[in-house]
Amino acid sequence: MLGYCSDVVSDVKSRSYDSPRRRAQAAETRRALLDAARRRFEEGGYASTSVPSIAAEANVALKTVYLIFETKAGLLRAVWEARLGGAEEATPVLQRSWFREVTAEADPVRKLGLVAAQARRVKASSGVLLDVIRTAAGSDPEIATLWSDIEAKLLRVQRAIVDQLDETKSLARGLTRREATDILWTLNHPTVWQLLVRERRWSSSRYETWLHGAFCLHLLGTPGATADEVH
């Protein structure tokens, strides 16, 4: 009987010991797949990238990919969410550190400068991936849903920023919150980054400075900061 109890305790300890290791291995497998998928999607686009090629690059069994992400579209969604959120992936956008910094800034010009800086950071790191998603949305219903979700989330964040400006009576005279939200959403849309930076070859710094100036001009009715003031 004592031997049996000892065996049970030993087995429980073994399973408890192995559980964190298994979780760590699962997390590492997921990271490897997300990294491989991002590289493949950004280099070859969505349609031309196969799930088997991603599995092979990550050195993971094909079955495992489908067990974790279910579909190719699910994998792309996971890549986007991980890329956008980084260490704060599980944190709602309006609670992330960059947005808390925006909220804490009382000066409207500097507030919009922080928004422009965040726009530059996100698009510099994820602009190619965003274009992959936008392009694939035209032919894949699941990706079309993802793109709609991205645009809707962008709109919610811009609305929250406009609400802050409206509360301090910083919006230009005659500009409604709805109009201001539409303007901010349009200027901050990834398509604008795509046109100016990827197609017209603007630098990221020039894009950020222009964006800040456009924010200030159209939302506050005042000129924005200079490049030196932004940086």
Image (spheres, grey):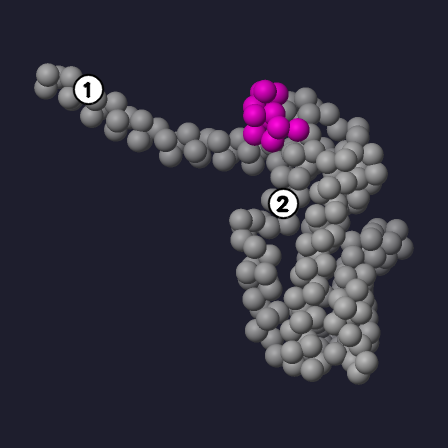
Which label was assigned to residue 120? none
Mark 2 burial class by Cα count in 10 Å: few <14, some 14-19, many 20+: some
- Disc 2, SS: helix
Residue stretch in magenta: 60-71
| Placement of 189 over or under 140, stated as above or below | below
Residue 75 falls left or right of residue 208: left
The residue at the point 77 percent across, 61 percent down is 185
The kind of residue on which mark 2 rests is Glu
The residue at the point 83 percent across, 34 percent down is 139
Q: Is residue 111 visible?
A: no
The kind of residue on which mark 1 rests is Asp
**Image position, residue 114 (x, y; %):** 66, 68
Front residue of 81 and 223:
81
**Image position, residue 84 (x, y; %):** 64, 50
Residue beneath label 2, please?
81
The residue at the point 80 percent across, 37 percent down is 136
The quadrant in which the N terminus is found is: top left
Residue 221 on the magenta span: no
Mark 1 burial class by Cα count in 10 Å: few <14, some 14-19, many 20+: few
Residue beneath label 1, please?
7
Q: Main secondary structure of the magenta part?
A: helix
